[in-house]
Image: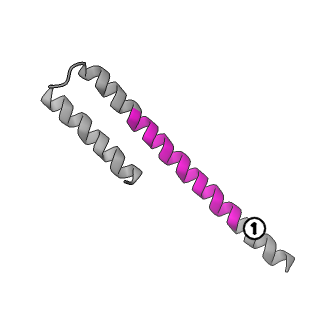
Amino acid sequence: MRLASLTTCMHQLRTNLEEQRQVDRLADFRRDVERLLYLSQAIGILTSRVHQLVVMRRSTRKTSKSIAS
């Protein structure tokens, strides 16, 4: 499952539970879901940045090799 899909599912879960009001300690559960959403978004940002760094490093290596040739 992609991170965006996971985030969307968590938002839907929170919304559904808030509408139904059938969960004990809904406020606590909501905070937990919001923390999970925050963490999943942070992981997505970090993953994106790591990917950008890998791409930049690969292009730097290619440039270095072509200059050396």
| Relative vertical location of residue 42 with respect to residue 67 in this rendering, above or below | above
Residue 47 location, x and y as percent? 54, 50
Which residue sits at x=75%, y=67%?
61
Q: Nearer the viewer, residue 2 or 68?
A: 2
Per the image, the residue denoted by label 1 is: 61
Single out the residue that lies furthest toward the top.
Answer: 25
Residue 5 location, x and y as percent? 34, 51
Is residue 59 found left or right of 66 in the rendered image? Answer: left
Location of residue 35 by image quarter: top left
Residue 44 location, x and y as percent? 48, 47
| Relative vertical location of residue 60 with respect to residue 29 in this rendering, above or below | below
Label 1 crowd bin: few (<14), some (14–19), many (20+), radius 10 Å = few
Residue 54 lies in the magenta stretch: yes
Which residue sits at x=34%, y=32%?
33
Q: Main secondary structure of the magenta part?
A: helix
Which range is magenta? 36-58
| Relative vertical location of residue 45 with respect to residue 13 in this rendering, above or below | below
Location of residue 29 by image quarter: top left
Mark 1 residue element: helix
